[in-house]
Image (cartoon, rainbow, N blue to C red):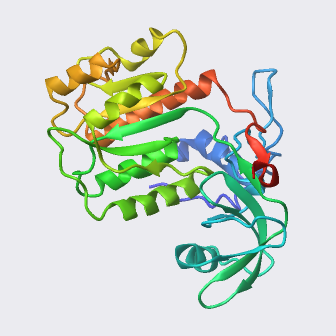
Amino acid sequence: MLKPICFTSFRPSNFNWTRRRHLMPGLDCCRMLQRAFVSKPRDASRQILVGSRLRVSCSTSTEHPDKARGGLPRFHVDEIPKCEGVVAKLDDDEFWHMTKVLRLKVNDRVELFDGKGGIVVGRLVNVNRHNAEVAAIEEPQIMAPAGPNWHVAAAFSTLKGGRGEWLVEKCTELGARTLTPLLTARSSVKSSGRSDRWERIAMAATKQSQRLHSMEIKRPASLQELLPQVAHVDVALVAAAYAPPLYKSLALLPSTPMNGILFIGPEGDFTPEEVELLIQVGTVPVGLGPRRLRVETAAVALLAGVMLMGDVVNPISRHSGTISLAHAE
């Protein structure tokens, strides 16, 4: 049995590698690991790829406008301060997260956002037993929505075991603009008492994914109510068994769509009559592989596919969509 080596004190100069190689199988691996742990770390911002002339610069800055500026902790408020010096109060979950989880102190800098594109940098000025006060230290900004604009209509109201909540969370993280619980012939039961929880989950996922515009969760709607909206988007897609793959269906379009509606049926899928209605109004059936997928899996797979294609075709500029709050009014 090999004796474990402490890499923090191990030095290759004190070890006879040639004579004792037969005692330690995998000695070369140990040497490489030792060098990785003991050697002085290099500057992460300047690394040269071995065997290539390409120099890679690793920077913490991002080109996406929704990303946190300066890496400050971000908190949600119903209304951000209108100008520098105005104080906003945080309570309930945001207060708990600020003081008990992150343990921020007075004079720490944070970001406040309202889930509608507004964001401002502030400083924590007061903490008491029930709430915290943050004063804006600069003029607020409003970020206009940028990037692909996709709306998801999925029959997930009857999902149990937290699967519907998982769908809400992942659609928010992937960037869906709206999510509508779809009522169909095989999923006609409206959810009761879940909308508030879905809203909280969507807001938590908005913070986690660094979005400034929270995903809007619509009221439950029938397929007949949503059909007229197909005429007002670039494309409407429906996940259907035995349909052509997603990439082939999108390749037939004159250009890569940047907004549309995604229809995902219930457990048991759409009825043939419902599929025929969708096709008649111009919805394109797309396949998601040879396997049978759950409702939440199909929704995430379809949304991820169209979002990634949109990001490749239309990358977002760093400064796109930024306007001053004073001019927005």
Q: Is residue 61 visible?
A: no
Q: Is residue 8 above or below residue 49?
A: below
Q: Residue at horizontal 18%, vertical 40%?
A: 267
Left/right of residue 161 with respect to residue 316 in the rendered view? left
Classify residue 280 by image quadrant. top left
Quadrant of the frame with the N terminus: bottom left
Q: Residue at horizontal 40%, vertical 14%?
A: 249
- Give 225 or 52, whichever is nearer the viewer: 225
Classify residue 222 by image quadrant. top left
Q: How many marks?
A: 0
Residue 105: horizontal and vertical position, in percent?
A: 73, 80
Classify residue 154 by image quadrant. top left
Q: Is residue 41 visible?
A: yes
Q: Is residue 52 above or below residue 74?
A: above
- Give 321 or 69, whichever is nearer the viewer: 321
Left/right of residue 56 with respect to residue 148 in the rendered view? right
Residue 147: horizontal and vertical position, in percent?
A: 61, 34
Q: Is residue 65 above or below residue 130?
A: above
Residue 27: horizontal and vertical position, in percent?
A: 59, 43
Residue 141: horizontal and vertical position, in percent?
A: 77, 53
Q: Residue at horizontal 75%, vertical 28%?
A: 49
Left/right of residue 44 with respect to residue 88 in the rendered view? right
- Give 99 or 328, whichever is nearer the viewer: 328
Q: Is residue 234 above or below residue 11?
A: above
Q: Residue at horizontal 43%, vertical 52%?
A: 169
- Residue most toward the bottom? 129
